[in-house]
Amino acid sequence: MKYEWRKEEKHLYFPKKVEIVDVPEYTFFIIDGMGNPNDALFSKEIEALYQASYSLRMLLKKGEFGEPFEYTVYPLEGLWTTSDGSRDDGLNKDALVYRIMIRQPSGVTKEMAKQSLAQVKIKKENPLLDQIKVEQYTDGKVVQMLHVGPFENEKYTFEKMKDFLKKTSFEPKMYMDNYAHREIYLSDARRVAPEKRKTLLRYQLKEKKTL
């Protein structure tokens, strides 16, 4: 039976309201970059990540790493910040710094992902495949909320998340000491109208300092 993360992992990707969850450790294909996500390079980087992810999916389906396992490829994710400190209405997209990634299924090790990546580099003539890194880590404790609508309106959802945290003992912290937040793209922006797009937003959390 095909594993569908949308059904089996609803608690991680489709919260009904703002909530705090603990995210386990997973293996990711990752590309680090800078610049405007509307530029052609960004689309090509996404393409490389999906090439790597679908290659690994095929190997797992064939049973190259043990028992055959069929699943739906996980969604694109992004960590975001800016190099000039611009935010919200004054955001300078050319100054964006990002880490885009695609999660791999539970049980996929770094070694398995690296073997698959080496194979896809032979089959696909895409120089951006050389930029892909394989890393395994966990977000740990996060606050998350599902945003429905255009990316430009995400700030209103983030405000709701921050208001929620005021009643808790937690506050946001920077991802990997640099990136401000995580976005998980549950809709294909090429096919879904902006007002219907679903994006999962996350802040990684730390305990509030007490005086």
Image (cartoon, grey):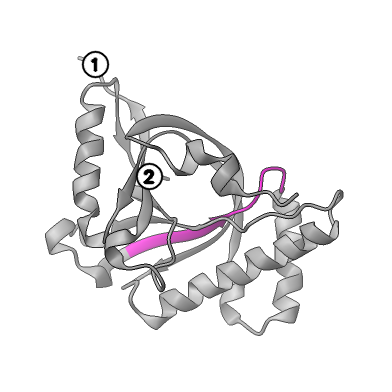
Q: Is residue 92 left or right of residue 123?
A: left
Please state which of residues 115 and 162 is positioned toward the viewer in this rendering.
162
Residue 4: x and y in percent read 62, 49
Q: Residue under circle 1?
A: 210
Residue 96: x and y in percent read 30, 65
Q: Residue under circle 2?
A: 177
User: Dividing the image into 4 quarters, which one contains the C terminus?
Assistant: top left
Residue at coordinates 22% horizontally, 35% vertically from top-left?
162
User: Please, what is the three-letter code of the amino acid marked with disc 1?
Assistant: Thr
Task: Find the magenta span and give its range.
Answer: 97-108
Give the image quarter of residue 49: bottom right
Q: Is residue 114 visible?
A: yes
Query: Is residue 176 placed above or below 188 in the rendered structure?
Result: above
Residue at coordinates 26% horizontally, 68% vertically from top-left?
95
For label 1, the crowd category at 10 Å Cα-Cα, with few meaning under 14, some 14 to 19 and many 20 or more, is few
Q: Is residue 180 visible?
A: no
